[in-house]
Image (spheres, helix red, strand yellow):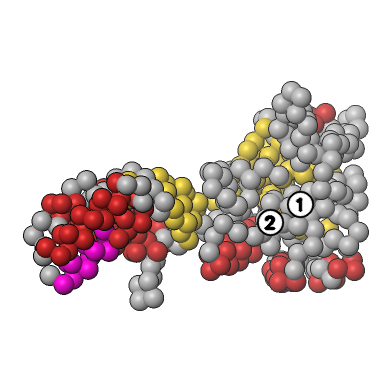
Amino acid sequence: MRAGEEDVALKLLHTADWHLGRDFPSFSRPAQEKLRRARLAVLDNVFSVADQRQVDAVLCAGDLFDGPHPTPEWWRGLAEKLSRTPAARPIFLLPGNHDALMPGSVWDPKYGFRALLPAHVTVVDQKNAIYPLKDGAVLLASPCTSIAGHDDQANALPARDPGDQTIRIGMVHGSTFQMKNWEANFPIAKDAAEKRGLDYLAIGDTHAFRIYGERPPTVYPSAPEPCTFGEDEAGFVAVVFVKRSRQVRIEKEGVAYWSWESVRVRSLEELRTLVARPDLGRRVLRVVLDLSLPAGEYEEALRLLEALEGTDAVPPKAGVLQLDRSGLTFDTRDIDEVFANMPEAIKDAARRLHEREKSGDGDVARRALYHLYTLARKVA
């Protein structure tokens, strides 16, 4: 027991939005495979936190699969990891809107997944279900039974009876996002936890770590691995401490392997600084180039980009790279000076290519000029 946990009656690990089987079509095939496998591998970190913090139960609040019909490598892989978790620690799996509880879905007993689950893993397959937790505490949970809906499942959970001092934990999947004239998918009222007499409401859907309210709190734990660029608060689980007085303390624990980052490079110096960074090995890095460089600097930029991407002989600096070169151009304004000391035939070819560039065939002419430049350097 850690310091400050003497009065804790219940410890939980809350996670959601694993999205096993998710595709990443904008990446190369090897990069896609890395990112897909990371979504399953990160669960080792999730369950390791549960072990280290000695939680009493693990709540998995929906969208555990990216779709209702995942291929066997994902549901068998998940079942294998769940089978290695301690039998004394219950784990609750909640169907979300991506992997809704529908006939023929992964949660259907005929699918094969549930037959592989150990006895301490429970699939929430009933509306407004109530499950016992440690020392009389209870979990109240409802699954999504379709990919879209407008019912507030949190507000439908059983209310607290007058005088009841039981620790009550809720778990549903949906959105607390509220805007006038905007219908959220499976909306969750921000005061639902208070209205239903819950001490903690575990939800999933948003991939960022978010806490709404203080007593009682409604919490998104985030996706344990980010799914795309811009998910700055993804990569966590929530460790939840409930005191005997029913007060709740929440700790955010990082579990992700990959960090996603998008960078726009506007100068050679910025590119040098980026390539020199020591933290790129665990980055999913999107680099957008926006710079025009003269011959020598252009050549250096290509060498730096090769270091980022890697070669058959040298491993890449970036763990996963998405590179947009469309904004990198060869600056030909001083091209006459570049070729000034070269043989006349090469200078004449450069002049003709430069004229062609000005006449409207810019991209092709600039590429040809750069190839002529590199060839002439090799000959020299």
Q: Assign a secondary structure to mark 2.
A: loop
Q: Amino acid at mark 1?
A: His
- Residue drawn at the location 71% of the way across and 45% of the way down: 204
Read off the residue under disc 1.
98
Question: Is residue 376 on the magenta stretch?
Answer: yes
First in residue order: circle 1 vs circle 2: 2
Q: Camera-side residue: 92 or 227? A: 227
Query: Dot 2, crowdedness within 10 Å: few (<14), some or many (≥20)?
Result: many
User: Taking 267 as reference, is 303 above or below it?
Assistant: below
Q: Assign a secondary structure to mark 1.
A: loop
User: Taking 312 as reference, is 331 above or below it?
Assistant: above
- Residue drawn at the location 32% of the way across and 47% of the way down: 359
- Side of 367 where 63 appears, left or right: right
Q: Camera-side residue: 46 or 4? A: 46
Distance CA(mark 1)–CA(mark 2): 8 Å
User: Where residue 88 sits: x, y (%)?
Assistant: 76, 63
- Residue drawn at the location 16% of the way across and 72% of the way down: 379
**Predominant secondary structure, magenta span:** helix
- Residue drawn at the location 27% of the way across and 64% of the way down: 371
Read off the residue under disc 2.
19
Is the C-beta separation of discs 1 and 2 under 8 Å? yes
